[in-house]
Amino acid sequence: MSTSPTPSERERKDKEDRAREAEEQAKLPYKWRQTISDLDIEVAVPGNLRGKDIDVTMTKTHLKVAVKGQEPVIDGPLPHEIHPSESTWTLEPTSSGKEISIHLDKTSKMQWWASVTTNAPYFLDTSKIQPENSKLGDLDGETRGMVEKMMYDQRQKEMGKPTSDEAKKFEMLEKFKKQHPEMDFSNAKMS
């Protein structure tokens, strides 16, 4: 018989997992972070390099980042598609040299990435990601409509009133009753 871990056991395991992920990510030759809609990568390079010394290639499904004449720092298929025309890279000065700063615009604004590329040596557990709060206005039209409907239905349930789907079923039944007054609907139940 298996039992669920206690809250303190779950918290300890989560803490260990975060420490392991941080250690694994520190081993990568780049740093990266993401929001639900984009991903940013920073690659430290020597301060004497110029933009013409850098080779960055971005397609919908692949990313390559290299200093010309050297092995790529990143070269592999992306886990999900990006908008290459909306994605950028720059070479910026830092206190210890320069860094290649890459911004990837995700095609799917509803998906967390476990890694920058599918051939990366380490992956994040995306189920543990705590998303930032977003505004309804930031969502695309279809997603916004779905979220607004869910919020409306939740409020209706809290007040003991029918959800939008239940109201629609009730409306259809009433319309059918009016069209067929000869039928007895006294025992009709909605499910």
Image (cartoon, rainbow, N blue to C red):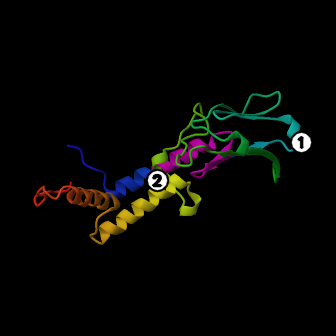
Secondary structure beneath label 1: loop
Whether residue 27 appears in magenta in the rendering, the answer is yes
Q: Earlier in the sequence, mark 1 or mark 2?
A: 2
Residue 146, horizontal then vertical, whole percent? 45, 55
Q: Nearer the viewer, mark 1 or mark 2?
A: 1
Taking the view exactly as shown, the residue that stands out farthest to the bottom is 159
Residue that appears at 53% across and 39% down: 123
Counting from the top left corner in percent of width and height, residue 145 is at 48, 57
Picture residue at 53% right of the left edge, 62% below the top: 136
Inspect this view and state whether residue 1 appears.
Answer: yes
Considering only vertical position in the picture, is 61 above or below 166? above
Q: Which mark is residue 15?
A: 2
Q: Which residue is mark 1?
A: 48
Residue toward you, 18 or 74: 74
Q: Is residue 13 left or right of residue 27?
A: left
**Quadrant in which residue 164 is drawn:** bottom left
For the question of whether residue 49 can be seen, the reply is: no
Q: Amino acid at mark 2?
A: Lys
Q: Taking 17 as reference, is 77 left or right?
A: right
For residue 10, side relative to residue 65 (left or right): left
Q: Is residue 43 above or below residue 14?
A: above
Between 64 and 17, the residue placed more toward the observer is 64
Magenta-colored span: 16-40
Give the answer, above or below, for where 161 lies relative to 85.
below
Whether residue 111 appears in magenta in the rendering, the answer is no
Q: Please indicate whether residue 67 sits to the left or right of residue 116 in the image.
A: right
- Mark 1: amino acid: Asn
Q: CA distance from mark 1 to mark 2?
A: 40 Å
